[in-house]
Every structure is written in structure tokens, then in C-alpha cells.
Image (cartoon, rainbow, N blue to C red):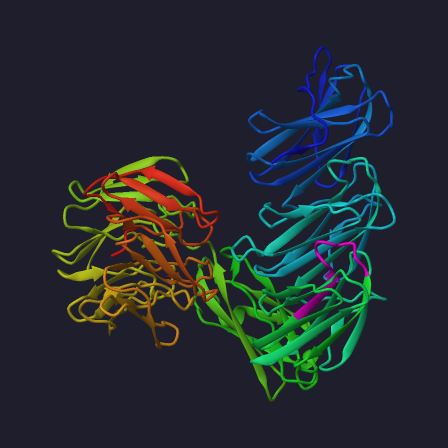
Amino acid sequence: MVRIAVVGAVLSAGAGSAFAQGALTNGADAVGAIASPGQTQTWTFTASQGDGLVLTVIDSAADPVWAPFVVVRAPDGSSLGSFGGPDVGQARLTASQTGTYSVAVGANPNVPNGIGPYILRLAKAPGSYTVPGGDQGGDLTNGEDHPGTITLGDLDLWSFHAQAGDALVLTVADQGSSLGPYIQIWGPNGASMASGDSGPATQLAFNAPLNQNGTGTYTVLISANVNAPGSTGNYILRLARAPASFVVPSGDQGGDLTNGQTSQGTITRGDLDLWRFAAGAGAAVSLTLTAQTTGLQIRVVGTNGAVLAAAASGLVTQVNLTALPSGIYTVVISAYINAPASTSNYTLLATGIQNPSQPPAIGTLPTIYTAVNTPIGVTVTLAGGANGPTALTLFGSSSNQTVVPNANLVFSGSGASRLLTITPAVNRSSVTTITLNASDGSQTATTSFVLVVGSLPRPGDFDGDHRSEVAVFRPSTGTWYIRNSGTGLNVGLVWGGAGDIPVPGDYDFDGLADMAVFRPSNGTWYLRQSSTFTMVTSVWGGVGDVPVPGDYDADGRTDIAVFRTSSGIWYIRNSATGLDEGLLWGGPGDVPVPGDYDADGKTDMAVFRPATGTWYLRSSATGTLTASVWGGIGDIAVAGDYDGDGRTDIAVFRASSGIWYIRNSRTGLDEGLLWGGLGDVPVPGDYDADGKTDMAVFRPSTGTWYIRSSINGALTVVVWGGAGDIPVLRRQ
């Protein structure tokens, strides 16, 4: 979406001249002047598709006759927008392509002979930026006040780091002027997270996305409103992030709450007061906010960033929480989000919480993502302990030593906030569970989180764009027909024949799915390595065996494996150790449903028993059994990571009705959704590259794929294949 202050005709050099001025620096002033009628000056900047962009142009001479005008063009030369104004113009844009953009400045077409000086400014996210001398911007400190001034056409860029799942509240408040500041927030990938202007004060609240785009640097822009780009004035910007350590500004209120004791505070315009408390496992906590005037709100944020309460009930608001897990909780007192300029004195009473000398507590963390060979820093929040959080000893372990050895977990810092630096092993990509312990010498608190290293291969991703491909195997000819989503090229290649079973996987650890078939008649696997285009064969299994390839040893390679339906034994050939393994798990009539149900980076043995609708899961981390009743006779098991938490979720497709029944491991919520019908073949996969399994079906009667995006629920229809074809992502 493009928002533009003043739009006119397309800028043309006419009879004048065009001059290249150079590259724009993000956040800096670019100064120029149009010296003769019809002249244009062109600036450039680079951007990636999806980047957020804001540009302003200012008549630096304040000449009522001179009105600078700007045209922005994409790398392919198409117009992205044009803007201007008598004194200042502003445009909010989104980069449509990756490459070099041009910004042409000249006179307004309505005053074509205008000449004069101008200042051009660019704000782009994500990316590094410059804060000009005497201007305001830079890193935001959690809980601190950050004052600033918006001059004519000014763009103040700020930034902060957040983890996936963090609760975030930001306010910007006018300080005695008519600025009515506008606030825009972009995520680490440039996606717009929130924006607005509500007059004297604006409050924005959201959670960092629970996916690979949630952790990283967020960019905040403060400016005049696009509908009043000439506004100027002073402001204060504030950030509340939880769970995380925070500061309490001098003269403000916040900090540790004491059980049974009333704390006092004052909310000024745009204020955010941060408090915290520790809770033991199963605690029942009551918080009572009493305001002098209406218009205040209380938020309680859990140990994982989930907002447990956000309430405003007149003068007295009470929040009661029960069965809490052990950890650190954050309380944010502010104006009500729909009345962000409200002010009042207040008192806050907390009961059922732990005092500082109570047992140690350690904040929980969401799933964290990092690239291959890229260390990552994680903030760990502590509380409690016999001598306070400063005296706590912190140590950790990794469940997958191949991906992250214990020696690669390094702690630094002191006090209630510590930094954990995790360095993955060289050239390793997989999943590991990091367990953290905080001890005061006599008692220990424990938490764990999942670390995903690299962009793990999606099922059926043949071109490395992290999307599952639409693909079928035609047994009559042994041909694979693949529609590559990354390159747009269609591939047809003979690999296999009648009676073969397609078993795609990343057998050579290059990040791409390899074409592969299992031939039951001779028990042979035929693998076509995408890294070398060579064939590898392996005799493993026989007639009646069901192929169950997966990464059973967490080395990033798909392992050859079969499930023997006659005996319920799994035969696995581990690629990391070269050891062969046979283990009884299941029996006749069971359907094998391998997956990473415990998020340790290894494929777990699991079966679905249609006769009773029971799933039997064997954790590769502990060897323990988990049994869950979900589904029944006629249902097709469609296990997948539907909520993006790194764990395989139990799910079935009911062929008689086309309904998918999913048990989400992250939220604990059960879901039922109609997608497909009688005769359709379920083909779940990550078709939109968001890290979540999408519901999809293949209709053999018409050769049509119906794919539902987990991002927005949008339908994609693709005709690819026909009767007799086997979709390579089909479920048994």
C-alpha cells in the first residue's frame, strides 16, 4: 500500500537537464538544489522486495513559489509513486522489487519553472541507519524515556531487539505541541507490524511473531503524520518488552512487586510503568489496580511473552491468575489503549507472589532460530534465589551435541539479566533443545527452549526455496513431474517404474529434496542425489514393508528406514553412525507416522492404530511412550508441524467428510477444518515457506491441487497430474 501526501503528474526533465546526485543514506539528509527550470536531480538507494520505505522532501528555502516534487521508480523503471507539497511532502511505500531504486527531484508540474534548494530524506527497514548530528534516534532501552524533536520533514529512526513471542508495547506522546506524532514499526524482515497516530499520544501493542521472522531487530520510525507532513514538535517514545530486563527512569515508578504490599505510581501522557514478580509452580496470583481517574489499563505478561491479561474496568481493575508455571512475570501499567492520552495516579496490590528471597526462577523462552554457522545471543531473565538473582549460577545443556555441543553454550553478564551466546557446530543444520538451570546452591530452577539452526528442508522442496513443491510420480512411466516454486521451471525426469514407491528426502545433505524410490519387489532403494546427480542404491527392506525415511540421528540427512507391518519392527540405517537398528514399535494394522514429536531434531518412531484411533509415540530423546486417542477407522494420518513450534502435531484427514482434525502441540488447542472431500488425497506440506504445515489435497479425478496457506488462509489451485499419478507428498 502506498500513502502519498500530494500526487501530481509524472515528473519529466522536459527541456531541462537531469543530473545524478549519488546514493541516499538511510536516515541521513541529502541536500540538493534545482538551479534552472526543468532540471531534475536523481538519487538512488538499494532495497529488497518487501522493505518498508518512507521518503520526505523539504523546501529548505521556505519559498512559496518553489515546490519540490519527487518521483520514485523501481529497479525495472516502473513508477512506485510521486509526491510533493508546498513546503514538505511525504510518501510511505513498500519495495516492490529487489534492486536499485531511483528518486528524481524537480519542480512541481503545476509550477514547472520553480527553482530552489531541497532536503531529501529516506527511512528504510530493515537495515542499518544513520542518526544525523543533533537529531534523535538509535537503540531503545526497555522501560526508558526517549525524547525527540520532529522538525519539518524529519524522520527519526529507532530500533530494538526482540525474541519471537515477546510481548511489545510502544507509546509516543506529544510534549506540549501540535505534532500528533506518527509511529511506524517494521519487523526484522521489513514487514509492517503496527502503525498509527491518535493525536497527542499513540499506543501500539502486539507480540513478536512466533516464527523465524520474530527474532531480530525491529525498526521504529517517528515522523509527522502523512496527512499533515508539515507538523513539528517534541515527543517522548517508550518501549515495554517482556519477558526481558528493564529500567525504571529516574522519577518514574516500577520494579519488583512485594507480596501483600501496595505500590504507588503515576501515569503521565504516554507513560509505561513496568513491574515484575516471581511465581512458583501452581501459584494463584491476584493483582488489583486502583486508579484515581478512569482510563488506565493493566497487562500481565507470562514467562513466554503471552499476554495473560489486558484489562481496564473503571477505577478498580482486578486480575486473578491461577495454576501459573514457575518463572518471572511482567506487569505493564499504562493508559487504556483506546484512550492513550489518559493520565492518573494509581496503586497496585499483588498477592500470591514470591518475595525476592524465594526459590530461583528463570524466564521461559520461545523457539529461537539462527542461520547455519551463525552464533546467536539469547537474553535469560532470572529472579529469586537465597541471595537474589545476582548470586545465581547459570548453566545449560544441548540435547543434540552434533548441532550444538555443550561447550558452545557460553554465559556472560550478571544480575537478573544474563546473555547466553550459542555457537552452532560448523556446517550443521537441525534442531536441538537447550535446557537452562539457575541455582542458588540449594535449589534449582529449570527451563528449556527449542533452537532451530538453519532453514530446515521442507518436505518435497526440490529447488531450495523452502517451499514444498507440487509434484507427482507417474508409475506407468516412472516419471517425476515437479513444478518448482522457486525457479518457475517445470521438471519431468524418469526415476523409477511401475510398483515403485516415491520416497523423496534430503539424502545427501545439500538442503534439497532428492528423487528416490523404494522397490518392494527387491527391497532396493534408488536415490538420485541432487548435489551430484549420481545414483546410490541400497538394499533395505522387502515385500510388505512400508518405507519410513526420516532423520533418525539428527545429522541433517534423511535415513533409509522401513516399517515391517507383519511384525511391527522398524529397521533403520543411520547415516551418521553407519549402524543399523531394529526396534519393535507397533504391530499388524498399525500405520507408521514418523515425525519429530519432541523437537529434539530426530525423527521419532510412531504409529497410528486406526482400530482404536490411538497414536503411540516413542520419544527419541527419552525412549518414553506417549499415547493419544485422535481419529478412527477410515481416517488418514496427516502428522505435521501445523503451529510452527518445531514439534510434529498429531492430525488426521477424515476422507468421508474432508475435515482435518489437528491437535496443536504449542497451544494445546484442537482444530477441525473442512478442506477437501471424498476421493481427495491429503498432501500436507509447507507450500508458503512460513515454517508451518499447510493443509492441501490432490484430486486425482481432475489432477487438481487445492492448497490452503497457513499465513492467511488463502486458496491456491494448481492443475498438475491426473488419475493414476501419485503425489509425492501423499500420506498413507
Number of numbered markers:
0
Residue at image coords 63%, 84%: 359
Q: Nearer the viewer, residue 674 or 503?
A: 674
Left-right relation of 234 to 524: right
Where's residue 677, x and y in %? 29, 48
Residue 185 position in % (x across, y down): 66, 48
Residue at x 77%, y 24% (from the top left corner): 68
| Residue 172 seen by the camera | yes
Span highlighted in magenta in the image:
330-343
At which x and y percent is residue 560? 26, 60
* Residue 142, quarter of picture: bottom right
Which quarter of the figure is the N terminus placed in? top right
Q: Is residue 404 magenta?
A: no
Q: Between residues 4 and 473, which one lies in front from this camera angle?
A: 4
Q: Quadrant of the C terminus?
A: bottom left
Asked if residue 334 is among those painted magenta in the image, a careful observer would answer yes
351 vs 565: above or below? below
* Residue at the spot 84% in from the left edge and 41% down from the top edge: 232
Residue 96 appears left or right of 661: right
Q: Residue furthest top?
A: 15
Q: Is residue 578 left or right of residue 137?
A: left
Quadrant in the rendering for residue 278: bottom right
- Residue 728 in view in this figure: no
